[in-house]
Amino acid sequence: MLQAGDTAPDFTARDGQGNEVRLADLRGQNVVLYFYPKDDTPGCTKEACSFRDANSIYQQEGIKVLGVSLDDEASHQAFAAKFNLPFTLLADTDHKVADAYGVYGEQRWGDKTYMGVARKTFLIDKEGKIKKVFDKVNVEQHADEVLDAFRS
């Protein structure tokens, strides 16, 4: 289980436009790496829109936001367009990134059990170290919580 102080696992994943994004290329920037279950679902939309609404502050603070789910590039394009999301969504269809961060596994929704991604956020500092891990996420206020954590 990754925790504050650990080196963030490097990865390469494709964004909604098919461009490769490598975490190592973002050294020197603070990064929010947030994992969410599925594009265009109620909770995931609220969480994404909280980051969207705080985007100008994140840009001013020099913080890069990366959302990660198992959805493919086309799904990310549609989700970003529908909700005017100005940050990068990464397609982790083979769940390699989710595995590296320990967020892929058995999930429960009501009476159903399935394999998927847990909602979890990692704050990564300019040196590539994990500054904080959010295990519990309030989807409507998450962007503010994350910003407060970077500032403290």
Image: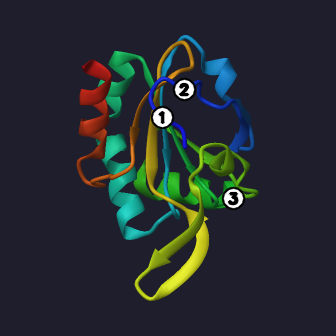
Question: Which residue is tagged 2?
Answer: 6
Residue at 51% from the left image edge and 14% from the top image edge: 126
Amino acid marked by disc 2: Asp
Name the front one of labels 3 and 1: 1
Mark 2 touches mark 1? (CB < 8 Å): yes
Give the CA distance from mark 2 to mark 1: 6 Å
Residue 72: image tag: 3
In the picture, measured across the screen, residue 129 lies left or right of residue 75, that is left
Query: Crowdedness of circle 1 by 10 Å Cα count: few (<14), some, many (20+)?
Result: some
| Alpha-carbon span between mark 2 and mark 3 | 29 Å
Coordinates of residue 92 in the picture (x, y in percent) = 68, 52
Query: Does residue 13 appear in the picture of this structure?
Result: yes
Q: Which amino acid does label 1 sit on?
A: Gln
Label 3, residues with CA under 10 Å away: few <14, some 14-19, many ≥20? some
Label 1's element?
loop
Mark 2 burial class by Cα count in 10 Å: few <14, some 14-19, many 20+: some
Q: Is mark 2 on a helix, strand or loop?
A: loop
Q: In the image, which disc is placed on residue 3?
A: 1
Choose mark 2 or mark 3, whichever is in front. Answer: 2
Q: Which of marks 3 and 1 is nearer the N terminus?
A: 1
Q: Where is residue 52 in the image (x, y as percent from the top left)?
A: 36, 42
Residue at screen point 50% across, 53% down: 81
